[in-house]
Structures are given as structure tokens and as C-alpha cells.
Image (cartoon, rainbow, N blue to C red):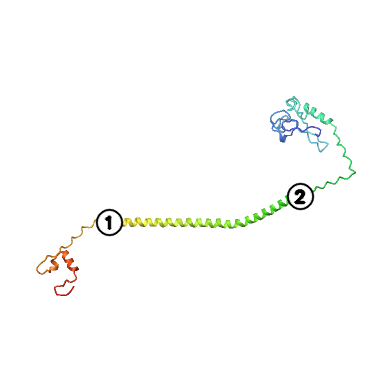
Amino acid sequence: MKDEQSWCFRCWGFGHISRYCFAAERCAWCSGPHDSRSCPHRAPPPAAPASDSASTPPQVSPPDTSLWECPRCHQAGVNVWHGCARRQTVAAPAATTIPQLAPPLPPPRSTPHPALPTISVSPQVTALSNTVAALQSRIASLEAALDGVEAPLDRLVEQRANLDNSLQTLAGSQKVIFKKIIASVATFTEKMDLFVARFETLPAAVAPRAPPPCGARATPFACASPLARAAAASSPGRRTPRGRVR
């Protein structure tokens, strides 16, 4: 109905629609908390027209209006579509409203629009624009130079990473070598301890032989004391018993 205000099919209030309604659902027939389409007290739909004029349409019993209650005006015996007082009072001003005509458009101007004034550029603005252009060119040159420096830096970073990996590998190898050396030294120490223990268990050494006694056939050199024999051996003019210089 185009002359009525917008109203909600959920709570049956005015001024909004059911899409934006967050109120509890009310029945349009009995004002109960259920959907109006499933209400047992709703009026039965009208019978379809008979295709044959001879056939008589089925008789539809009138609805029981004693159980009706409008969710708008809360009157018994009426519903939203039949006898609601609030619907009639809201729809009456809307039906009597006369649409207002739009105001007429102003007549076209006969005189042309004045030309826009020309704005003269001051020397300061020109100099500032030139300075900005020079700075932009300088910034572009610096960006190009930075792009050229980034590639060597990336190579240096890669070489540093490779060097770190090599140092880590070398450190690991040295650790392995040190462990092997320590194990060898420990094995050698154990062997030396075993050798010393075995040497200590050997019997005592044999005493040295005594010099032979000075008999009748012994020479005077043999019967002399050790000091005398050493002095005689060191003298150059001593002769042997056979007369040869020794």
C-alpha cells in the first residue's frame, strides 16, 4: 500500500522493516509469540474460482474472531489487516497528503561567464620549483648509486656466510683431532703405567763380580789399586813388560 508508512512484519510496528528489527516476533492474528503464517487462528485463504460454472465452490467456514488480538492496538476480535485502529490513524494523514511540486528551474543566462583571471607566477615560486626538480634528480641519482652498492654488499654477506661455515667445519675437525690426540695420550699413559708396574715386579739385579785376587802369576798392574792403574795408564813413558812403549 503506497500511501501507508513502512511497517515491520516481525513486531508489526511502524517506521522500520523486519530486516532491521530485533524485537520479539508477534503474530498478526492472535498477538502470540509465533510466526503469523503458522497461526491456527488465521483466516482461511479464499477459495479458488471454479473453472466450470456448473460446479459449486466448497463452503468455507468463517474464522473464529473471538481469539483474534491485534499486536498493534491490542484490541480483541481484530487483527493487523482487519479492524486495526492504529493502522487507520497512521494511514489517514498519508492518504490526504498532497505532493508538492518541484520549483521551476531558473532561466538560462544570456550573458557568457566571465573569463577566469590569469595568475602570474612569482620568481620565488619558479625558483622553488627549480630547486625541487633538482632535488628530485639528485634523489634519483642517489637511489641508482645505492642500487649499485647493494649488489657488492650482498656478495660480501654471502662470502661472510661461507667463511663462517668453513670456520665452523674447521673447528669441528680440530675438535675431532684433539679428541683423538687426547685418546692416544691416555692410551700411551696407560701403557707406560703398565710397563712401570711390570718393571717393579722384576727380581733384584745380580751383584757385580769382584776383581780377581793378586796371585803369583798376576802382574803388578793387575794387583795395583784402581787409582794406581788409572795413573799408570795416563803416563806416556810407561813400558809394557816386553819393552814396548804403550
Amino acid type of disc 1? Val
Query: Which of 161/227 is in front?
Result: 227
Query: Which of 73/38 is in front?
Result: 73
**Label 2: element kind:** helix
Name the residue tied to disc 2. 123
Image quarter for residue 14?
top right
Task: Please identify the residue farthest to the right as the structure is shown.
Answer: 110
**Label 1: element kind:** helix
Looking at marks 1 and 2 on the same chain, the residue that comes earlier in the sequence is marked by 2
Name the residue tied to disc 1. 196
Residue 51, image x and y in percent? 81, 38
Image quarter for residue 179?
bottom left
Image: 230 above or below 11: below
Image: 117 above or below 151: above
Residue beneath the point at 12% across and 68% down: 220
- Quadrant where the image shows the N terminus: top right
